[in-house]
Amino acid sequence: MPVSPYHPPMTTPDLSAALNREQANEELFDLLRIPSVSADPTRTADMAATAEFLRAKLAGLGFTARIDPTAGHPVVYAERLNAPGKPTVLIYGHYDVQPEAPLEEWVTPPFEPTVRDGRIYARGSTDDKGQAYAHVKGVELLLTQGELPVNVKFLLEGEEEIGSPNLEPYLRDHAEELKADVIVISDGSRFAPDVPTITYGVRGLSYVEIHVQGANRDLHSGSYGGAAPNPINALAEIITRLKDDQGRVTIPGFYDGIDDLTDTERQMWADLPHDDAAFAASIGVPALPGEAGYTTLERLWGRPTLDVNGIWGGYQGEGSKTVIAAKAGAKVSMRLVPGQDPERITRLISEYVPTLAPAGTTAVVHPHHGGRPFKFDLNSPYNLAANRALKRVFGREAVFARTGGSIPIVAAFNDLLHAPVLFVDLGLNEDAPHSPNESFAVSDYHNGILTSAYLLQELGAPTTAE
């Protein structure tokens, strides 16, 4: 595991005593009360109100702050550049949230923040209003002690939950203004409640649909069964043949060029406090199937996958209807690792699936979207600065992990802003982002504020700035 080199102790006081926790909570609650659901066209005014809330807050902290329109929901941009010779840190987050449905599964109203058992329950509490606002409050905390130790820019978008369709054009149009030495993102989960975590890699994605066609219409299963092709059976056969009995994807060329896990990574992850039985129990399953020869964490973070995310075909209403469906389909996602290109993987599955179609059927693949995998240097000065900051909050070294998820916007940051990304996630998987009863531990919110403040101090220290 990377260990920070000798670093002189910070001369600033412990900021914990200066943090007004009650005020921090009330401000976050006000932000969470605004139903900024980007996917809902009836909430355009709420999206605008959320953007104005953030702009006004940052302007009140002495930032030059504005709301920039896009073809969809607006972007909030703010900057405070009063640290000549020091690094420039761009903090990215998003203020839009997932729809609240199913409403009946919420214990308390999704847009009325409620604290229960030390957790803030509200839509957006962890994803990403709580984590993003922790950075706003971290900056404010530092400003109570004097000027910021680095130059800070905020980029807060309103379309992350719908795929950020207008962010890449925005980055392209504002690339010069958005220049930074490092981009900080907090929009995910730590490894465990008491384990500070730095995420240094994300998997990529190729998402497709498979469509299987049989006859030119649905057929009576008594009149045609035994003679006519059945697209649902054919689809099941195709899906089964996409993996072998060792859990490996069978698409020719799928594994070509993959960056192997290093011995350092495998040992680092083996040392983490992970228990397969507890992990299985947490999701209510008796076993954890996957690619043979790899541990659970290695399969989650460092190996590619292929999963069926949805499937349809035939009659699915109440009662029975004896038909052989004319068509069937499935949605398939492939998580990718460094060395795999999403466009190439999409092409490979598009060429392979038609060859698996049983007699009498045809199969075609319709591409959707994708994203590139990324892996960052474990020993970068930014990772080491984050490690030092987290140690000041948690009293222990951070662990370095990859995430199994995909964050396509990272590719745009890399291509258009040419700056490394530093993931310092503040939440936990148990926060249930995107689910009913989403929450964020009050202690994680407060620790996030301190982490943000200490991170900016460490990024401005000579070992990082020089």
Image (cartoon, grey):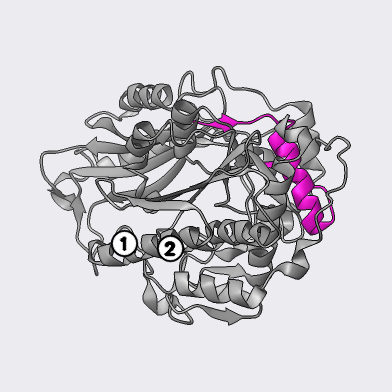
Label 1 neighbour load within 10 Å: few <14, some 14-19, many 20+: some
Element carrying mark 2:
helix
Hey, what amino acid is under mark 2? Ala
Hey, what amino acid is under mark 1? Ala
Label 2 neighbour load within 10 Å: few <14, some 14-19, many 20+: some
| Left or right relative to 178: residue 262 | right
Where residue 48 is drawn, which disc sits there? 1
| Residue 259 visible from this viewpoint | yes
Question: What is the x, y in percent for residue 255?
Answer: 54, 22
Question: What is the x, y in percent for residue 314?
Answer: 23, 52
Location of mark 2 (residue): 56
Q: Is residue 136 above or below residue 235?
A: below
> Any magenta on residue 201?
no
Which quadrant is the C terminus positioned in?
A: top right
At 75% from the left edge and 51% from the top edge, which residue is drawn? 390
Part of the protein shown in magenta = 372-401
Q: Who is closer to the viewer here, 157 or 120?
A: 157
Element carrying mark 1:
helix
